[in-house]
Image: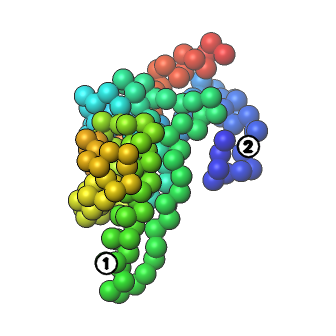
Amino acid sequence: MIVNLPWLEGQPLRQALEARLGCPVALANDANCFALSEATDGAGAGAEVVFGVILGTGVGGALVVRGEVVVGANATAGEWGHNPWPTPEGAGAVDAVAGYAERLAQALAAVINLLDPDVIVLGGGLSEIAALYRLVPAAWGAHASVTRPATRLVRARFGPESGLRGAARLTPRAISEVAES
């Protein structure tokens, strides 16, 4: 499923790229790559259950359990929804951060209720808003099934390189799976 590129739906993209490049190609979701990188040796290293969140021009999510990306039957595991960013100006911008943090806390509380991750790692442009790491955990208890979730909210260790690092980790296994198919 390619939500942002619907014209590619059902197209043999991998095969077309392989024909053009002359080598095996593996395709993977950017959020899955991000979460794998951060779960392996990034901000979520050592945690059993890591939920990775990309907050930027789009919103993505991925689940890594015991070092393995959970893809799911429909290849949508971890895709937890859309959390649009308001665009006020001036003094309203401060209130916008607080309002966004509250909505993000509600959404992540649902993730905590469903998946009970040890850590939630934020990446993407909006992950640079320092106040989120204080405001969101303070608010998510009001929306989670436990009032004081033990889940930690952390910034991605590898920032914009996390996705690329995760793709590199997936590549050897993914290429061998492509070769076998």
Q: Secondary structure at mark 1?
A: helix
- Mark 1 touches mark 2? (CB < 8 Å): no
Rendered-image quadrant of the N terminus: top right
Determine which quarter of the picture holds residue 17: top right
- Give the labeled residue for mark 2: 9
Q: Residue at x 49, y 19 (%)?
A: 173
In front: label 1 or label 2: 1
Mark drawn on residue 135: none
- What is the x, y in percent for residue 154? 27, 47
Q: Residues within 10 Å of mark 2 (few under 14, many from 20)?
A: few
Q: Amino acid at mark 1?
A: Val
Q: Nearer the viewer, residue 7 or 107?
A: 107
Q: Earlier in the sequence, mark 1 or mark 2?
A: 2
Q: Is residue 26 above or below residue 7?
A: above
Say if 102 sits above or below 55 in the image.
Answer: below
Name the residue: 46% across, 68% down: 85
Q: CA distance from mark 1 to mark 2?
A: 40 Å
Determine if residue 40 is in view.
Answer: no
Q: Quadrant of the C terminus?
A: top right
Return the residue found at the far top: 180
Give the labeled residue for mark 1. 94
Residue 127's place in the image compared with 20, above or below, is: below
Q: What amino acid does circle 2 point to?
A: Glu
Q: Splitting the image into 4 quarters, where does residue 44 fall?
A: top left
Viewer-closest of 1 and 164: 1
SS label for mark 2: loop
Could one spot residue 25 in this view of the protein? yes
Residue at 59% in and 24% down: 24
Task: Give the image location of residue 79, x and y in percent.
Answer: 53, 44
At 57% from the left and 17% from the top, the residue drawn is: 177
